[in-house]
Image (cartoon, rainbow, N blue to C red):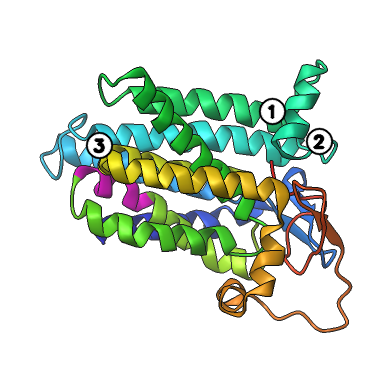
């Protein structure tokens, strides 16, 4: 709880102190209401985790908390934040809608054109392999399975980021049982600042003052996936892996936004805390990875697509 609180406070300070930086023209994107909103708000999450880990290292060196280097999970989580954050940031700034979904991005790669989506797929897989291999020797099959789990968790969080606060809300739905299982162990302590920082930007995300962006969605999803690999038994990991595979495949065929809007409990949870939009607001359409047009009642950047 303390680590969550510190992560939250670090993120809140960075949001307030970095207001002018986040409003830099290069980061502004027009949402469906034609309002300019800073994207890549996930930079706040990454920076907050870095600040917390730096503070932990200093305190640990003075015998207040774990000595530096003792908790390997902290270093892995930090690497995951920087790695997935960098790939997401590149997509937030340089991405376009010319290719959609895994098939679209990989198809462009086969034709000799590297898209930011393909860069995320390849780079995310590489980061996941490094993370899955670091804890110690594992069989080749287990290494691949764990790496796929981490990469798909990061991608699923990105797929959910089509409405204000959606990714963070569902991340906490996944985090609560994980936190209960992890208890007060090293992995729980390592992951907590990430979730605290995500909570710190939730209000601004819901109120359309910041877009979490691929930068933040990839970081939150990747960190959760890594925590599962580090702290959950093999059998449960296999079940989670199957669920992630199914959800990522379904996202290529069906719009999550359509499903959420069609199910009242999911719709209520999705809209909880979001700002109300007048009935006269003209919504643009967003296209998901399957090429299906959906009403963009979710204030994301123009041209945002499911299935990256």
Q: Is residue 100 left or right of residue 216?
A: right
- In front here: 17 or 1? 1
Rendered location of residue 302, percent (x, y): 82, 54
Q: Are marks 1 and 2 in contact (CB under 8 Å)?
A: yes
Label 1: few (<14), some (14–19) or many (≥20) C-alpha neighbours in 10 Å:
many
Indicate the secondary structure of the residue bearing disc 1. Answer: helix
Dividing the picture into quarters, in which one does residue 76 lie?
top left
Rendered location of residue 298, percent (x, y): 72, 66
Label 3 belongs to which residue? Answer: 57
Rendered location of residue 158, percent (x, y): 60, 47
Q: Which residue is rendered at x = 51% and y = 22% of the image?
A: 126
- Part of the protein shown in magenta: 186-193
**Please, is residue 166 above or below residue 212 in the view?**
below
Dividing the picture into quarters, in which one does residue 281 lie?
bottom right
Label 1 belongs to which residue? Answer: 118
Q: CA distance from mark 1 to mark 3?
A: 35 Å
Q: Which residue is rendered at x = 77% and y = 47% of the image?
A: 290
Rendered location of residue 202, percent (x, y): 53, 64
Indicate the secondary structure of the residue bearing disc 2. Answer: loop
Quadrant location of the N terminus? Answer: bottom left
Q: Which residue is rendered at x = 87% and y = 63% of the image?
A: 284
Label 2 belongs to which residue? Answer: 99
Quadrant location of the C terminus? Answer: top right
Indicate the secondary structure of the residue bearing disc 3. Answer: helix
Q: CA distance from mark 1 to mark 2?
A: 9 Å
- Is residue 224 rendered magenta in the image? no
Label 2: few (<14), some (14–19) or many (≥20) C-alpha neighbours in 10 Å:
many
Q: Is residue 218 visible?
A: no
């Amino acid at each position: 709880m303390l680590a969550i609180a510190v992560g939250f406070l670090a993120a809140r300070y960075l949001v307030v102190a970095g207001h002018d930086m986040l409003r830099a023209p290069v980061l502004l994107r027009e949402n469906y209401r034609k309002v300019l909103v800073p994207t890549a708000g996930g930079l706040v999450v990454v920076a907050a985790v870095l600040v917390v880990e730096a503070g932990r290292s200093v305190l640990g060196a003075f015998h207040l908390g774990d000595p530096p280097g003792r908790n390997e999970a902290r270093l892995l989580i930090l690497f995951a934040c920087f790695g997935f954050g960098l790939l997401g940031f590149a997509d937030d700034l340089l991405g376009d809608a010319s290719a959609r979904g895994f098939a679209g991005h990989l198809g462009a790669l086969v034709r000799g054109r590297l898209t930011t989506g393909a860069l995320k797929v390849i780079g995310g897989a590489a980061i996941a392999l490094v993370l899955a291999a670091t804890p110690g020797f594992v069989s080749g099959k287990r290494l691949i399975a764990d790496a796929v789990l981490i990469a798909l968790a990061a991608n699923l969080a990105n797929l959910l980021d089509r409405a204000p606060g959606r990714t963070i809300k569902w991340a906490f739905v996944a985090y609560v049982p994980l936190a209960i299982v992890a208890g007060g162990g090293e992995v729980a302590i390592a992951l907590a600042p990430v979730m605290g920082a995500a909570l710190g930007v939730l209000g601004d995300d819901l109120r359309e003052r910041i877009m979490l962006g691929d930068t933040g969605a990839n970081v939150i999803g990747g960190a959760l996936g890594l925590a599962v690999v580090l702290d959950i038994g093999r059998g449960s990991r296999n079940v989670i892996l199957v669920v992630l595979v199914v959800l990522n495949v379904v996202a290529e065929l069906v719009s999550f936004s359509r499903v959420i809007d069609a199910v009242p409990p999911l719709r209520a949870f999705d809209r909880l805390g979001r700002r109300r939009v007048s009935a006269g607001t003209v919504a643009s359409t967003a296209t998901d990875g399957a090429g299906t047009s959906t009403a963009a009642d979710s204030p994301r950047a123009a041209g945002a697509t499911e299935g990256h």
